[in-house]
Amino acid sequence: MTYSIRPCQRREELAACVELQKEIWGYTDAEVYPLRLFVNLTRIGGHALGAFTDRGQLVGFVAAMPAWRDGRRYLHSLSLGVAAGHRDRGLGRALKLAQRDEALRAGVRLVEWTYDPMRAKNAFFNIVRLGAIARRYVPDYYGLVASRLQQGLPTDRLICEWWLTSKRVKRALEGKPARSPQLRPAAEVAIPNDFESLAEQRPKKARALQAAVRSQFQKWFNRKLIVTGFVRGDRFSHYLLDPADDDRKR
């Protein structure tokens, strides 16, 4: 099957983004980003980019809204998702690359988004494959949500910073290590590779582990360290942190 990446423009395409949220994350009607938001995104400097099959079916999307903080214009990426049966085919990365192109054409150099720090696959994608960094951790960012992926746990989130024209991002997008493998990290934070199964089978242990990881990130971020790397192991993976004032981060 072949795919194309392009902006979602027709109302039916934007409505399909709403339905994909329910399919991918199991959100209720009250929790999805509504159609009116997607319509507005396309008119105020944001975007909704879709991954379409050769038959025109929407099977993935990435959406972002314009944002402003500390005198800097940037994009906040709201969602990135690919439907079951179409994953592990490079669509997530293709959507993010298209998002990067959209941002650069608009003169934007920074895209931010949130993700669950306990999900090793997402961490590898964000930090290693895309070259993002993280220096902020927000406990229970969204409050209680009904998503089956959240499994009743607090919605703790890391905030990714994707500096689009940085050296580390360019290296990552070229398939090179964004962070030098020879560089000794100032700190590490370990997470299990399969936190989903742990949360399903041993929810109390999963909650305690999440709290321990939260405490570690808060400690290291308070000491001005930032996430610059992620290394996968057999059972556990490790976030790698370095000083925030090191020019190698950008």
Image (cartoon, rainbow, N blue to C red):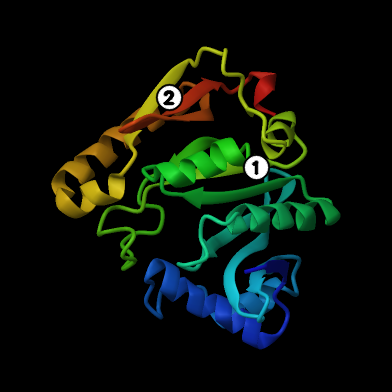
Q: Nearer the viewer, mark 1 or mark 2?
A: 1
The residue closer to the viewer here, 160 or 51, is: 51
Label 2 amino acid?
Answer: Trp
Task: Please name the amino acid that badge 1 sits on.
Answer: Trp
Name the residue located 28 percent from the left edge and 41 percent from the top edge: 210
Question: Of the residues under marks 1 and 2, which one precedes in the sequence?
Answer: 1
Residue found at the far front of this picture: 1
Residue 155 to residue 207: above or below: below
Residue 85 seen in render = yes
Query: Judging from the image, what secondary structure is the residue with disc 1 in?
Result: strand
- In-image side of 198 versus 94 (left or right): left
Which residue is at the front of the view, 78 or 121? 121
Residue 48's place in the image compared with 185, above or below, is: below
Name the element at disc 2: helix
Quarter location, residue 76: bottom right
Determine which residue is flagged by label 1: 162
Image coordinates of residue 75 in percent, x first then y, are 68, 54
Q: Looking at the picture, how far across and down is residue 57, in whole percent?
A: 61, 79
Question: Along the line of sight, which residue is nearer the eye, 230 or 59?
Answer: 59
Q: Residues within 10 Å of mark 2 (few under 14, many from 20)?
A: many
The answer to whether any part of residue 158 appears in the image is no
Q: Which residue is drawn at 56% across and 13% down?
A: 183
| Residue 224 picture location, percent across and down | 52, 23
Q: How far apart are marks 1 and 2 (CA)?
A: 20 Å
Q: Name the residue under label 2.
A: 220
User: Would you identify the image quadrant in which residue 170 lies?
Assistant: top right
- Most distant residue in the bottom direction: 12
